[in-house]
Amino acid sequence: MFRPKPTSRLILLTLTLLLLVNFLTSIKASEPTADENEDGELEELLALDEQVEQEEEQEGSSATVRSSEAEVLTKAQRIVLELNHDNTKRVIEGHEFVLVLGYAPWCSRSAELMPQFAEAATSLKELGSPLLLAKLDAERHPKTASSLEIKGFPTLLLFVNGTSHVYTGGFSAEEIVIWARKKTGEPVIRISSVTEAEEFLKKQHIFVVGLFEKFEGPDYEEFVKAAAVDNAIQFVGVSNIEVAKVLFPTVKPTNLFLGIVKSEPERYTSYEGTFETDKILQFLDYNKLPLVNKLTETNSARVYSSPIKLQVLVFAEAYDFKKLLEPLQDVARQFKSKILFIYIDNTDENLAKPYLTLFGLEESNSTVVTAFDISVNSKYLLESDPTPSNIKEFCSGLLRGTLSSHFKSQPIPDNTNETVQSIVGKTFDDKVLNSHKNVLLEVFTPWCINCETTSKHVEKLAKHFKGLDNLVFARIDASANEHPKLQVNDYPTLLFYTANDKANPIKLSTKSSLKDLGTTINKHLKAKAKDNVAKEKDNVPKDEL
């Protein structure tokens, strides 16, 4: 192998060092000086370090929250016993109280209820309740579900010493706990200290507080009876005025008091009546709901069960309603216990669309205010802008009974050169009831299976009788148009309005053949013609004898 001489190695090293110095010098010349970029680089490095630290903290915090939530949920779900074909009978018969949740894995409402049920199980265990909570996958164990009479999902059933009882409570964790405690022997909770009261306030969103000199006597007995009958609200009994003030700050020193507390702007409401079970329950029915109720699948049963017959429904997107909520609460406060105010997100098709369809507004994206009088089955629509002042005036009219009922209608159509006239809600009076002609009206809906055949018959009859000036053929879509004097439940329906008696239309058979329908129409026309002739003769002055 060739080995360079020492002299050659020295020359080679010298040349390499010279080249390296020249390279570094050229780079140095092209870069900013240390004084120019030192501060900038330091700021960039500090900013980058700070950003990384923040991201790490956020990730760590989120991970901690997720881990904590998962841990709580897992722990809660372990408390809920999983039933199957082998253990169901043994569990139900072996415990005094068992609350069973029948569910299906694909059911969305079951999925929503499951964490609430698990949370309720945790709370009940901490409270020392004797109630065991269990769940059954009804799809996996259909025979077991059938034996428990679980038919829909989710289903909650309370078993007391093996006997099944229907669940009648709410579906939040808090509502499940309240219902369960009442049904297992604790309709009223007694609180004796300020500390207990303060801890209780942290956990309850709505409750009834009763102040008594002693937990005995007729008044207290009626209070307990009301607590046992009510399924959704926790009743609290106290005998110390200082404890009562923690729960209901405006309570006055007295030996007897009852009030309801809610976590909303209208937080405290006092009861002014006598202590009778029915009257206490009636007071709760009229005051337990918020000033404005956001309708959901979970609370719909509770809202619909309200005894308040006048209801105002506001449909709006969440962002628009957020701005309207506070002034709407001010309006609702003025009609408290007289009008029930309900908000429905109009992007929720399951809840909003059925209502909006009643007004012909199912495609509306703007804020809509409607009202219902349940006692007379009437509906109303605010046709002006939904400002707080207009809503207040609308509510005043609803309360006084001066609003005009709303009947939906399509736009007025152009019937020029149409053989069969299209009637809408707005034209029903003029074209049918106030018309001097005979009118054959076909009432149909787009989803009606048999309507197409009847429509073809009407078209052919209209062409056949085209030469008659005193007969009009018309049709109306009952799904999109309403009128107080058009009450039809079967489709298709054929109604013959004679010129002289529009109040009593004659119903024709839609099952008749085309020929039979033509014959029937002719018969009614001739009969009315004879009646007209007879009436004219009766009106002719007679010579006196």
Image: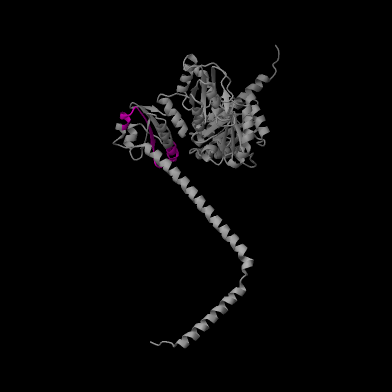
Q: Nearer the viewer, residue 108 or 8?
A: 8
| Magenta stretch: includes residue 109 | yes
The C terminus lies in which quarter of the figure? top right
Q: Quadrant of residue 30?
A: bottom right
Q: Position of residue 41 (x, y in %)?
A: 59, 63
Q: Quadrant of residue 75?
A: top left
x and y percentages locating residue 166 in the rendered image: 40, 28
- Counting the numbered discs, the total is 0
- How far across and down, in percent of the image, does residue 282 sit? 53, 21
Looking at the picture, tell me which residue is in the foreground, 490 or 156.
156
Q: Residue 502 placed where, x, y %?
A: 61, 27
Looking at the image, residue 544 lies above or below residue 424: above
Q: Is residue 241 above or below residue 119?
A: above
Drawn side of residue 9 relative to residue 43, left or right: left
| Residue 170 is a magenta residue | no
Q: Quadrant location of the N terminus?
A: bottom left
Foreground: 147 or 483? 147
Seen at 56% across and 78% down, the residue is: 21
Render colour scheme: one colour
**Outermost top residue:** 545
Question: In this orientation, does residue 170 appear?
Answer: no
Toward the viewer: 195 or 152?
195
Query: Which stretch is magenta?
Result: 91-116
User: Where 440 falls versus 220 (above or below)?
Assistant: below
Q: Is residue 38 visible?
A: yes
